[in-house]
Amino acid sequence: DPKLGNWWLGFGDNTLVGYWPAELFTHLADHADMVEWGGEIVNTKSSGKHTATQMGSGHFAEDGFRQASYFRNIEVVDADNSLSPVQSLSTLAEDTNCYNIQSSYNTDWGNFFYFGGPGNNAQCP
């Protein structure tokens, strides 16, 4: 919200799902330098092995549509308060034997990525 400095999260056709008042992010009064999407788990290895906590649907990115979790048509609000497609999308997965990510682009989905994984498995002890 360029007038009040508040931050909103929306999806689909004008469905607002998150709100952060300007007071929480005084360093973001004008703009953000980076936006992140994805998943996160906590892995304390309390039993000496990687957690079995799934990320997303529990499927790896390469399992694709109908199995892996995904974000598509990724857009941000620009300085004119208009939606703009993300111009540069980079990915990061810390242990691809446990969880992974694959990004791509097409005309139907714009910028998109599949992500997820099962956590503990034979390749992720």
Image (cartoon, helix red, strand yellow):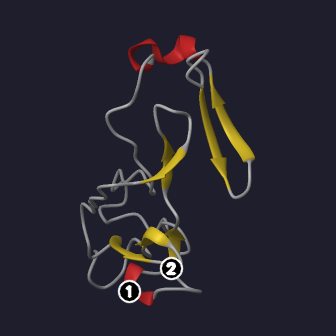
62 to 90, vertically: above or below: below
From the viewer's side, name the closer residue of 124 and 79.
79
From the viewer's side, name the closer residue of 106 and 36.
106
Residue neighbourhood size for the residue with mark 2, other residues' Cα within 10 Å, grouped as few (<14), some (14–19), many (≥20)? many
Q: Secondary structure at mark 1?
A: helix
Q: Secondary structure at mark 2?
A: loop
Which residue is identified by label 1? 62
User: Which residue is drawn at the image coordinates 45% and 52% (left, top)?
Assistant: 37
Which residue is identified by label 2? 68
Q: Quadrant of the C terminus?
A: bottom left
Q: Quadrant of residue 19?
A: top right
Q: Are marks 1 and 2 in contact (CB under 8 Å)?
A: yes
67 to 33, vertically: above or below: below
Mark 2 belongs to which amino acid? Ala
What is the spatial separation of the Cα atoms under label 1 and label 2, in whole angstroms?
7 Å
Image location of residue 88, percent across then percent down: 29, 56
The answer to whether residue 70 is left or right of residue 123 is right
